[in-house]
Amino acid sequence: MAIPSPVRCVLFDAVGTLIFADPPVSAVYSEAANRFGLTLDEATVEQRFTEAFSKYNVNMQDGGEATSEANERDRWRSIVAEVFPELGQCEELYTRLWEHFSLPASWRLYHDVADCWRRWSDRRVMLGIASNFDERLRGICRGLPPLDCEHVFMSSRLGWRKPAAQFFHAIEDTVALRPDELLLVGDDWASDCLGATVAGWQTVYLDRAGHSERPFAIRSLAELL
């Protein structure tokens, strides 16, 4: 798939695009809860987590939302409490999970990331990450080469979550490029692709499962080359 000119900077979403949790979130949550005397199978935890994450995630109808590091911590505190209502607001459990997912060892690169990153670096294209994540992402990227790069943009630092236009405009100001010179690659159609398109960016939708017939869709980052 050819990248349309005149792209000068390619930014990638993080979770689901470049990295994934290993062990899976459901396994980590289930094991952590077990330490507090609550036994739940992973299928139940996964269902609860999916529902809680959707509930506290940004809704496209809102056009994105303002956020901060404190807001992101509170959001994840609410998600953990929603997954484990039997334990209520268990700060110790929340802290254990927060710290676990701050470790580079808790994440893995997808198989196609390193080669894609190297090839685009060889073409002297500016590369970076643009994610609805918090400050933990910097430490994660430092421990997962080649993601230890200069441009790591997090919603908690920018003050807005995708798909808010302010998220994209803040990045434009930082890299000093026009919207049409920026390309975002992401696995979330609403937050990544529609948000970037509305902001005037170019975009590619990464559909690793291959279930979508949306335009500008690829199944692997290798197709981006």
Image: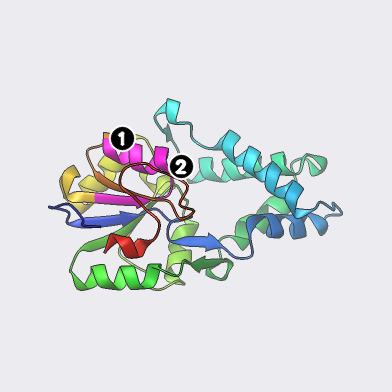
Q: Nearer the viewer, mark 2 or mark 1?
A: 1
Instruction: State the residue at coordinates (62%, 62%).
Output: 100
Tag 1: amino acid: Ala
**Residue 165 circle label:** 1
**Position above or below: 189 against 62:** below
Residue 80 in view, yes or no: no
> Do residues under tags 2 and 1 come within 8 Å of each other at their CB atoms?
no
Of residues 63 and 156, the one nearer the viewer is 63
- Horizontally, residue 181 falls left or right of residue 46, namely left
Q: Nearer the viewer, residue 105 or 74?
A: 105
The answer to whether residue 66 is magenta is no
Quadrant location of residue 83?
top right
Main SS category, magenta section: helix
Relative image position of residue 213 (x, y in whole percent): 39, 43
Q: Position of residue 194 (x, y in %)?
A: 34, 37
Q: Which residues are magenta?
A: 183-197
| Mark 2 surroundings within 10 Å by alpha-carbon count, few (fewer than 14), some (14 through 19), many (20 or more) | some
Q: Quadrant of the N terminus?
A: bottom left
The residue carrying mark 2 is 68
Please give left or right for residue 138 compared with residue 21 in the image: left
Q: Is residue 170 left or right of residue 97?
A: left
Instruction: Assign a secondary structure to mark 2.
Output: loop
Q: Point out residue 189 in the picture as x, y percentages from the top left corner.
A: 40, 41
Q: Earlier in the sequence, mark 2 or mark 1?
A: 2
| Residue nearest the observer in this picture, 138 or 60 | 60
In this image, 207 relative to 204: left or right?
Answer: right
Residue at the location (17% across, 52% down)? 4
